[in-house]
Amino acid sequence: TMLVLKIITRIKKIVLKGRNKMLDNFLQYGQWVVLVLSIMSLYLVSSTKHEKRLQGYALTGVSRFSGAAIFIFFDLYAFVIANLIQTYIAFDGYRNNKKLGETP
């Protein structure tokens, strides 16, 4: 895990070395996009319709992964790990529910 943190830190140094306004905007507004995606995914996951629930699991995975990407830039590694775990759980839920919907 230390190797992964060193690699992430090195990538951040390279990316942030040429930091510009576009990256600042991405970090500033990206958090709000992740929030909207998270709210939409919770709405879909709570649906009683099978297809909407599947869409909710997929959207949860995407929003959690996006959150992890943003947290990397703020050195919040515990949140990165938490979001990656939630990403795995969301896509695992999608896969398990997809199988459930295929059985007659």
Image (cartoon, rainbow, N blue to C red):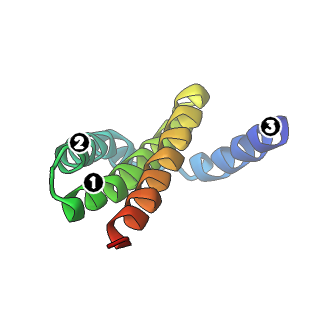
Q: Which residue carries the number 1 mark?
A: 56
Q: Identify the residue at the far right of this view.
A: 3
Q: Is residue 80 left or right of residue 93?
A: right
Q: Type of residue at label 2?
A: Leu
Q: Which residue is mark 3?
A: 1
Residue 64: x and y, percent? 42, 45
> Which quadrant: the N terminus?
top right
Residue sitting at x 42%, y 42%: 67
Which quadrant of the structure image shows residue 102?
Answer: bottom left
Residue 92 position (above or below residue 67): below
Say whether marks 2 and 1 touch (CB < 8 Å): yes
Where disc 3 sits, the SS reads loop
* Kind of residue indicated by mark 1: Gly
Determine crowd level at label 2: few under 14, some 14-19, many 20+ residues with C-alpha closer than 10 A: some
Q: CA distance from mark 3 to mark 1?
A: 31 Å
Residue 101 visible in the picture? yes
Which is more toward the observer, 100 or 81?
A: 100
Q: Which mark is residue 69?
A: none
Q: Mark 1 or mark 3, which is nearer the start of the sequence?
A: 3
Q: Where residue 18 sits: x, y (%)?
A: 57, 53
Mark 3 vs mark 1, foreground winner is: 1
Cα distance between the residues tagged 2 and 1: 7 Å
Q: Which element type, helix, strand or loop, lies under badge 2?
A: helix
**Residue occupied by mark 2:** 42
